[in-house]
Image: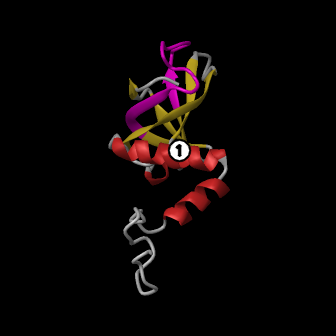
Amino acid sequence: MDEVSASTPPGAGPRGRERGKGGLRRFLRRMASTKAELEAEELQKTTGDEGATPITDCAARKRHCVAGTLRTVTLRPRGGAPALEAELYDGTDVINLVWLGRRKIAGIDPGRRLRAEGLVSEQDGRKVMFNPRYELRGGA
């Protein structure tokens, strides 16, 4: 016979039911979430672990450190000179990283994790960081 009475709170009891509050709630939320939502949540966790500022919290005209995954990498000329542009996503927002005068940088590829530091500016309503210092993280 089970020794748990009706007055015992859920999640407590002798048979390993000490799982913690909200276990079923977390499970159901994960089942109802889309793959993109789950990936964004995971990116937000890892960004915080790296000591980076969430992109949504980055103010223009200030230096910030951001971290995330490169979504796209394109070669787009600016003012007649080559410029390598990459879109970094951290689960909260995106920021464009632009390296002026560069056609290719080894390791800067879509899917790559990256940490970047530099001055954030705003251009056409989008956050941009020109010639950021960067550190490549784990692979794609």
Is 107 covered by the magenta stretch? yes
Q: Is residue 100 above or below residue 46?
A: above
Q: Is residue 27 left or right of residue 66?
A: right
44 up-or-down from 107: above or below? below
The residue furthest front is 1
Q: Quadrant of the N terminus?
A: bottom left
Determine crowd level at label 1: few under 14, some 14-19, many 20+ residues with C-alpha closer than 10 A.
Answer: some
| Residue 15 percent location from the top left of the image | 41, 64
- Can residue 119 be seen in the rendering of this structure? yes
- In the image shown, does 68 or 22 lie closer to the viewer? 22
The residue identified by callout 1 is 122
Task: Locate residue 8, reporting x and y percent.
Answer: 40, 82
Total numbered labels: 1
Does the segment drawn in magenta span residue 124? no
Q: Residue at x 49, y 14 (%)?
A: 105
> Is 12 placed above or below 117 here?
below
User: Colour scheme of this structure image?
Assistant: secondary structure
The answer to which quarter of the image holds residue 81 is top right
Looking at numbered disc 1 in the image, what kind of residue is underneath it?
Answer: Glu
As rendered, which of 95 and 68 lies closer to the eye? 68
**Image point 48% across, 16% down: which residue?**
107
- Region rendered in magenta: 97-119
**x then y, percent, for residue 80:** 62, 17
Q: Residue at x 52, y 33 (%)?
A: 69
Q: Quadrant of residue 36?
A: top right
The furthest residue to the left: 51
Q: Position of residue 125 (x, y in %)?
A: 60, 48
